[in-house]
Each structure stands twice: as C-alpha cells, then as structure tokens.
Amino acid sequence: MIKKRVLNALNSQLNAELYSAYLYLAMEAYFESINLSGFANWMRAQAQEELIHAMKFYDYIVARGERVDLTAIDEPQKEWDSPLAVFEHVYEHEKMVTGLINDLVDISVAESDHATTNFLQWYVAEQVEEEESASGVLQRVKLTADSPGGLFMLDSELGLRVFNPPVKEE
Ligand SMILES: [Fe+2]
Ligand SMILES: [Fe+2]
C-alpha cells in the first residue's frame, strides 16, 4: 500500500515520462522533415528510453498493490527553428524532469515511504546521465553553428545511437 499523496505523485510522474517520449517523438518527426535522419534516430532511441522510464513507474505502482491511473498526455511542441533550438529544448526539458524527480523524492521522504525513496534513486542517477547526454549533444550542435559540414558529420554520428532494452533484473 502507498499513501495517497505518494501514489498520486508516482502516477503523475508516469504521465510525465510518457509525455517525454511524446516530445522526443515530435522532435524525431521534425528532424525527419528536414532530412537529418541521424538526429531523428537519436530522438527515437531517446523516446524508447522514456517509455522504459514510464514502465518502471507502472510496474512499481502495480508491485506495491496499487492501481495505475492513466491520464491525458499533453500535445507536444512540433516545430523548432533549428537543430540548436531542439537541443536547447531537450536540455531544458531534462533539467525540468530532474526537478520533478527531486520533488518526488522529497514527497516520499516527507511521507516516510522508504521503499519509494529507494526506488527513486535509480531515477536520480539516470537524470545525471540524461542531463549529461543532452548537454553533450547541445555543445556539439553549437560547435557546428557556422559549418553545415559539421552538422552532417554530427548527424552521421547520432545515427549510430542504438537503443538497448534493459535486461530485467529479478
Ligand atoms: Fe525520463
Ligand atoms: Fe529523459
């Protein structure tokens, strides 16, 4: 059993993770529309990771004997001015999500839900990686600002990103 306040926060983070997947799929579509298929590939992998994040919340809520509550997912932004604008958005978005995870940890601590506090540590560590990878690509897109050749090289490199589904640990 989970206290109502913690359960509501977990369900709302499940929605936020699905929204993240939706946002990255919108970014993928944008990159496909401007023929940067490597950037699009990076976004597909990013969206697949967000679905994993969402399903971990789903499974945790079920494991604690509670019911998942699926609410409407907001429509994501669909247009950006440039690849740079997209990656500025990605970095801002991931920093915002880090804030949501931190707030969720605060709630679990305030409600003395040690199992949830423990469960959330995976996300605390994951957000360090998420911010690092977003800011890493952002810095590199900035370097290509005056060089279309650089942008195409980066596109080839981002095309190599492969999504690795996690191995289920029991
Ligand atoms: Fe996430
Ligand atoms: Fe993320």
Image (cartoon, helix red, strand yellow):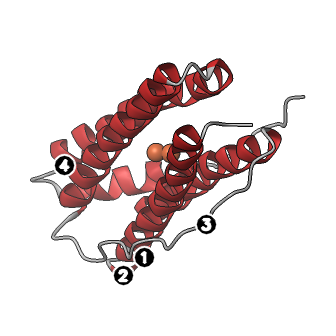
The answer to which of marks 2 and 3 sits earlier in the sequence is 2
- Residue shown at the point (18%, 59%) measured from the top left: 85
The answer to which of marks 1 and 3 sits earlier in the sequence is 1
Out of 33 and 115, give the one closest to the viewer. Answer: 115
Label 3 secondary element:
loop
Disc 1 crowd rating (10 Å Cα; few below 14, some 14-19, many 20+) is: some
CB of mark 2 within 8 Å of CB of mark 3? no
User: Which residue is denoted by mark 2 in the rendering?
Assistant: 33
Residue 144 shown left or right of residue 39 in the figure: left
Relative to 131, is 154 above or below? below
Residue at the bottom extreme of this rendering = 33
Give the amino acid type for the residue marked by disc 4 in the picture: Thr
User: Which residue is denoted by mark 1 in the rendering?
Assistant: 29
Disc 2 crowd rating (10 Å Cα; few below 14, some 14-19, many 20+) is: few
Label 2 secondary element:
helix
Say if disc 4 is inside 8 Å of ligand 2: no
Give the amino acid type for the residue marked by disc 3 in the picture: Leu
Depth check, mark 4 against mark 3: the one in front is 3
Residue 26 shown left or right of residue 14 in the figure: left
Q: Which mark is residue 144?
A: 4
Depth check, mark 4 against mark 2: the one in front is 2
CB of mark 1 within 8 Å of CB of mark 2? yes
- Residue shown at the point (28%, 44%) measured from the top left: 91
Depth check, mark 1 against mark 4: the one in front is 1
User: Which residue is denoted by mark 3 in the rendering?
Assistant: 70
Judge whether residue 160 can be spotted in this image.
no
Marks 1 and 4, Cα distance to the nearest angstrom? 21 Å
- Residue 10, image x and y in percent? 56, 44
